[in-house]
Amino acid sequence: MIDLEKNFENVQLEEDRGFDIRFVTMQHNSPCHWHREMEILYILNGHATVNMDGERYEVNPLEAIVVDYTKAHGVLYALPQTMGICIHVSRSLLNRYLLNQELVSFHCIRKHLTEETKEAYSRICETLKEITLLYMNQKKTYLLRNTSLMLNLLAELVEYFSTPVTPVTTYTRLTNIERLEQVCDYVEHHYQEEIALQDAADELGLNREYFCRFFKQNMGIPFVKYVNQVRINHIYQDLLHTEDSIQEIMERHGFFNQKLFYRMFKEHYGCTPREVRNLAKNNPYV
């Protein structure tokens, strides 16, 4: 179960299984966020854009992308119809089968494939296709077969798309994430109001300049842009699921500069709020 109201996801996995699979569509768009689990996104139809490390990665049908543990990222699923599966994998599942091994981080993105990794990436996508079919047609042996496929997929990732990391690096990343959770909780509770940089810095006991550097280094975007992404995501959800006027929705979620709002919305989603609402009408994916 994932708490979609938070911008860091609280992914709750069954401990004995160690992974979770769910369908995702346009209504699962998310601003920059993170979770302690690795995320594997596989697009079935349509198109998704993943923002990570200051870059935009396009994910097309039957392609996959892997987001490393605690890596900040945002996801946009294109209108009018996009569907995929999203798999979260706990660190404990890997540790169960990689006893006494070094900690590893993962980097599996089609854009960065080499001659040595292309075949492994193709095998991973084929495995994800099989996992999807099993997930859609769950039979008595579903868990057995899906667990087998997941372990094969993880073996490919470890062998071809992982690099060792030190315990100190891992500890530092977790510490930074815990501090960011605090400030992102603050944003989630106050995004409808004016949020000053100093207020956010005070939440972590940092001076303003250091806070700005810390936030951008760990989230990949400036703090002010992050706050506006949170606002725009809430507005997007209300456009899909309510009949309220655009002006009312915009102001309810903390945007009072109409010109800035329309410019940022168009930059973020590639269309206007009215076009989003029209595309969502009678859409089975919403």
Image (tube, grey):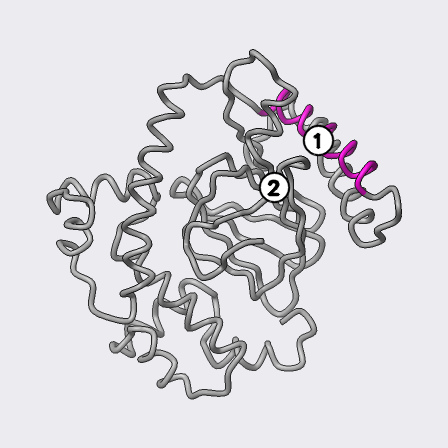
Numbered range of the magenta stretch: 143-161
Disc with the residue nearer the chain's start (1 vs 2):
2
Is 64 positioned to the left or the right of 104 in the image?
right
Is 11 positioned to the left or the right of 255 in the image?
right
Q: Position of residue 55 (x, y in %)?
A: 43, 43
Whether 234 is drawn above or below 85: the answer is below
For residue 246, which numbered disc appears in the image? none
Q: Position of residue 36 (x, y in %)?
A: 48, 38
Is 39 positioned to the left or the right of 194 in the image?
right
Is 199 positioned to the left or the right of 76 in the image?
left
Mark 1 secondary-structure assignment: helix
- Give the image quarter of residue 211: top left
Whether 120 is drawn above or below 81: the answer is above
> Which residue does the numbered mark 1 point to in the structure image?
153
Mark 2 secondary-structure assignment: strand
- Give the image quarter of residue 108: top right
Tell me if label 1 and label 2 are in contact, CB under 8 Å.
Answer: yes
Quarter of the image with the C terminus is: bottom right
- Give the image quarter of residue 199: bottom left
Name the residue located 68 percent from the left edge and 24 percent from the top edge. 155
Q: Position of residue 166 (x, y in %)?
A: 41, 17
> Which residue does the numbered mark 2 point to in the structure image?
40
Whether 270 is drawn above or below 203: the answer is below
Amino acid type of disc 1? Leu
Name the residue located 29 percent from the left edge and 73 percent from the top edge. 254
Name the residue located 70 percent from the left edge and 73 percent from the top edge. 284
Question: Disc 1 and disc 2: Cα gap in Å?
Answer: 10 Å
Name the residue located 48 percent from the left edge and 78 percent from the top edge. 239
Confirm whether the magenta stretch covers residue 209. Answer: no
